[in-house]
Amino acid sequence: MRSILFVLAGLMVMGLAFWSYQENYKTRDVISDVRSLHGQIGSNHERLGMLRAEWAYLNRPDRLSDLAELNFERLGLLPLMPNAFGRVDQVIYPIPDVLPIIVPIEVGSTPAPVDGEEAL
Amino acid sequence: MIRTPLRPLARILKAREKGENPDAIEAENIRLRREDVRDKSRMRAEGRLLVMGAMFALAYGAIGVRMGALAGTVPEEPQSTVVGNPIFGQRADIVDRNGRILATNLDTHALYAHPRDMVDPEQTARELAAIFPELKVDQLVRDFTGTRKFVWIRRQLSPEQMQQVHDIGSPGLVFGPREMRLYPNGAIAAHILGGASYGREGVASAEVIGVAGVERKFDEYLRDPANEGAPLELSIDLTIQAAAEEVLAGGMSIMNAKGAASVLMDVHTGEIISMVSLPDFDPNKRPQVLLTGDQSDSPLFNRAVQGVYELGSTFKIFAVAQAMELGLINPETMINTKGPLQWGKFRIRDFHDYGAQLSATDVIVQSSNIGTARIAMQIGAERQQEFLRSLGFMEATPVELQEAPSGAPLLPRNWSELSTMTISYGHGLSSSPLHLATAYSSLLNGGTRVYPTLLHRENRQTGPRIVRAEISERSRDMLRQVVSRGTASFGEVEGYEVGGKTGTADKPKENGGGYYKDKVIATFASVFPANDPQYVLIVTFDEPSENSGSEPRRTAGWTAVPVAAEMIRRVAPLLGLRPQVDRTEPIGVTLTSN
């Protein structure tokens, strides 16, 4: 009877050792995963920060007013003045269809293709 | 196992034949058997001791080996868990009240050199000088061929420049990562943002520190990783700031002024929606601080906060409002305006002669120095000081700028009765346009003190009461009349009920000894809409002169007022204020349903 108990205890120890060994490796895998995810998040943050800075730079008021002036004939944009406020009954209805954009502007903000991946 | 019997029959019989005691045989056998048992148990005990010893040796050996290994290797932080987010190491962004970026970071590279690794130092120096025109070939050659092991070349590189340096291909040129502070809007809000520069610098990284403005004031907050990258939200509105700068710059060139400043403030929250000081600068390329001469000539000088000027007649409303609060006068009280008013050898005159008397309202509307001085004499020096202190004129503004303490007002050393009279119409006390904006907001918002702030706030400030609500209302009625029939008639903006007070003060000579005859500070302090004040706008010009007529006109009514009106016209719609137009018919909307 006692020897059976010994054998069982021995088997249990072996089983636990095997389990903890596996858990240890899984944990390490997860940690390295997390680390690489952090790296990715970091580089994405950098990219995002760069894009935000670029967005802010391209939308700076000086440039927008220059662009509005350059494209005045096409867009007719003026600074917002008090006479821009109207009444509800001055709003036309139904709203006429907006003309389609004929010359779309490409914005190159897609990430660079990874090695071996086809460029889109 | 064969068990030996204790009394083997054969031996017993033999012993009996010989007449020996058979019990001796039994005793002998028992002894042998016991010896046998003893030997076995000793063997087992020895074996156990051996195993135990081996175990101990193994355990201590393992510990010893581990200790040796730990002692012999480089210390390393155990990384069983990943704590914290490494991303928010950067300096936080600064955004306007709508979240538009005013300051952010950009990753770039610094360039340094290890001259010992260079193959051809002179060639490298020549090629570097070709890329960066500000570098001198002789200096670089001296640096590269001397005894130095390490030379900084540039703190920041653009990607194109970095590629060009790469193309030189010298192994002695090394790049280090750098973070750069970027102000994408250029000169807009330059004085508020201030600027940033590098603190402690290393090869792998450098500290970005604020040098002026909010960058300096909130340096610790911006660098604190505990905020997890949360941006600093200012009360400034980028669009309005840009529009205000555009209008003010245009006005400054038309009025031939040396400088200009404007402050737009929410009267209830004390938020500064826009604050402009011209001339300005680009915080991305912050100019050097002037080492000689007058600091106020530098574009770095913030006229709206640091510039203290005698703001002239804009102060008159304070004297009148206080006298009304004290019950000394009401708007219809007639005030003696017969001039000139003699005090010792000092004479107070008016711009025009307004006759023997004017009502208190007309003293403000016509801007009579004599009338205001007489009202101030009724108030007295002590009560006047107390009132101006409650409006914040006795100390520097508490606005969140590093430069704010340097904008402390200049007060008379001895507050005599003459000082009381001159200060009542804005001479003898110098303060900044921001002081004036704060005081007008406090007086006109219903009569409670507000403190100027550059941080975005949702809630109204509930400061101590300055004047009763009805006095605040009477004051704004007076200011409204200044625009509708007084000195600021150019300030009328249809739909916005502008109220305000002009102020034209002669500039004091730098070396003392009186005032310039042809140099003035022209100020227009306005509030709109006057029937329900929302915003206060101060516009100040330094040495303006409007030359379209036969002789130059310098009064605020001709210089600051039209510019302020144009600014309100541009800015009020952006603030979401709808013009109040008299409607003859109700809105023609018919509600239908189907």
Image (tube, coloured by chain):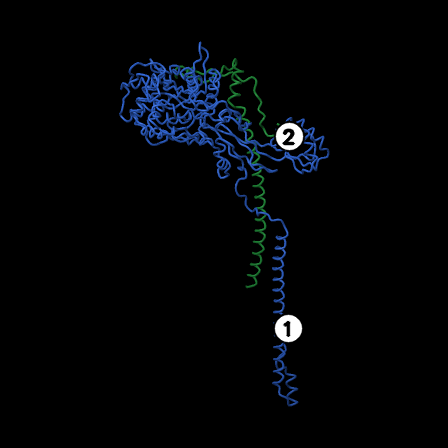
Which chain is the one coloured blue?
B
Q: Label 1 sits on what residue type?
A: Met
Q: Which chain is green?
A: A
Q: Disc 2 on helix, strand or loop? A: helix
Q: Is residue B573 visible?
A: no
Tell me, for residue B94, which label it has, or none: none
Where residue B258 sits in the image (x, y, percent)? 48, 20
Give the chain letter at badge 1: B
Residue, disc 2: B162
User: Observer-nearest residue: A40 or A71?
Assistant: A71
On screen, residue B157 versus residue B222, left or right, reads: right
Q: CA distance from mark 2 to mark 1?
A: 93 Å
CB under 8 Å between discs 2 and 1: no
Q: Amino acid at mark 2?
A: Met
| Badge 1 density bin: few <14, some 14–19, many ≥20, Cα 10 Å | few
Horizontal and vertical percent position of residue B58: 62, 60
